[in-house]
Image (cartoon, grey):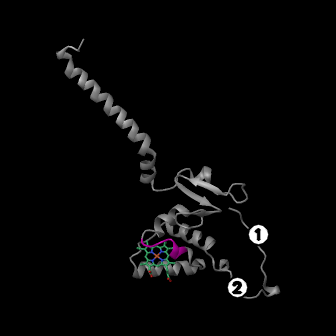
């Protein structure tokens, strides 16, 4: 027995509707979370997953990004406070390598930023500037380059290492 001809349009409509719902669900399952990540343009679950020195597993999934031993693999940047802002700002024009290959004091970093602002079209960093400078000064400070002058015993300044 075939469906009554006058019901066919209704059946076709229902069939189309179900098809659209299934397609939409599949598309969402496949791409939805990725699109949301891309839109937010930042690693998700930063707080919950943040790198903790001394934890057993040094690989952390940050959204789709990986952080291994405190280094954000995609950029090579140290994954620390201010990372999101530095990544967002300092990889816009050039590779993060320019950042990671350099070492400077806070003043030195400030000079580089001023130079880029004067010559390379870097914009005013506003409230982000102190955050960026603190990140750079803390993670890419001059003493982290392997070579240093010999220690003069009476010049050693001891300090308490801050872990956060
Ligand atoms: C508006 C574009 C732009 C942005 C944004 C930008 N830079 Fe640059 N930067 C440049 C250009 C252009 C150069 C020169 C590149 C070259 O020499 O190949 C440069 C060079 C550098 C250098 C190398 C300087 C040297 O003495 O060789 C460092 C370090 C650097 N940038 C760090 C940063 C940091 C940190 C940030 C984030 C605050 C940043 N850049 C954001 C454009 C930019």
Q: Residue at x 53, y 74 (%)?
A: 99
- What percent of the width, then of the height, locates residue 36? 43, 48
Circle on res. 160: 1
Mark 2 crowdedness (10 Å alpha carbons): few <14, some 14-19, many ≥20: few
- What percent of the width, then of the height, locates residue 31? 42, 45
For disc 2, the marked residue is 148
Q: Mark 1 and ligand 1: say if the CB distance to the nearest ligand atom is below 8 Å.
A: no
Left or right of 139 in this view: 17 = left
Image quarter hosting the N terminus: top left
Q: Which residues are magenta?
A: 93-99
- Which mark is nearer the camera, 2 or 1? 2
Q: Residue at x 23, y 15 (%)?
A: 3
Circle nearer the N terminus (2, 1) = 2
Is residue 98 one of those drawn in magenta? yes
State the image quarter where residue 164 is shown: bottom right
- What percent of the width, then of the height, locates residue 63? 53, 52
Residue situated in front as seen by the camera: 16 or 150: 16
Q: Residue at x 46, y 67 (%)?
A: 89
Is residue 16 one of those drawn in magenta? no
Left or right of 10 in this view: 87 = right
């Amino acid at each position: 027995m075939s469906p009554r001809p006058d019901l066919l349009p209704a059946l076709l409509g229902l069939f189309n509707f179900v098809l659209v719902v299934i397609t939409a669900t599949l598309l969402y399952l496949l791409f939805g979370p990725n699109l949301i990540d891309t839109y937010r343009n930042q690693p998700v679950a930063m707080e919950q997953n943040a790198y903790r020195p001394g934890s057993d597993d040094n690989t952390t999934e940050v959204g789709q990004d990986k952080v291994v031993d405190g280094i954000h693999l995609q950029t090579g940047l140290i994954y620390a406070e201010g990372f999101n802002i530095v990544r967002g700002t300092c990889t816009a024009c050039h590779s993060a390598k320019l950042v990671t290959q350099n070492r400077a004091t806070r003043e030195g970093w400030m000079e580089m930023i001023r130079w880029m602002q004067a010559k390379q079209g870097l914009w005013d960093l506003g409230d982000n500037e102190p955050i960026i400078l603190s990140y750079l000064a803390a993670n890419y400070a001059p003493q982290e380059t392997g070579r240093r002058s010999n220690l003069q015993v009476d010049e050693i300044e001891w300090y308490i290492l801050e872990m956060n």
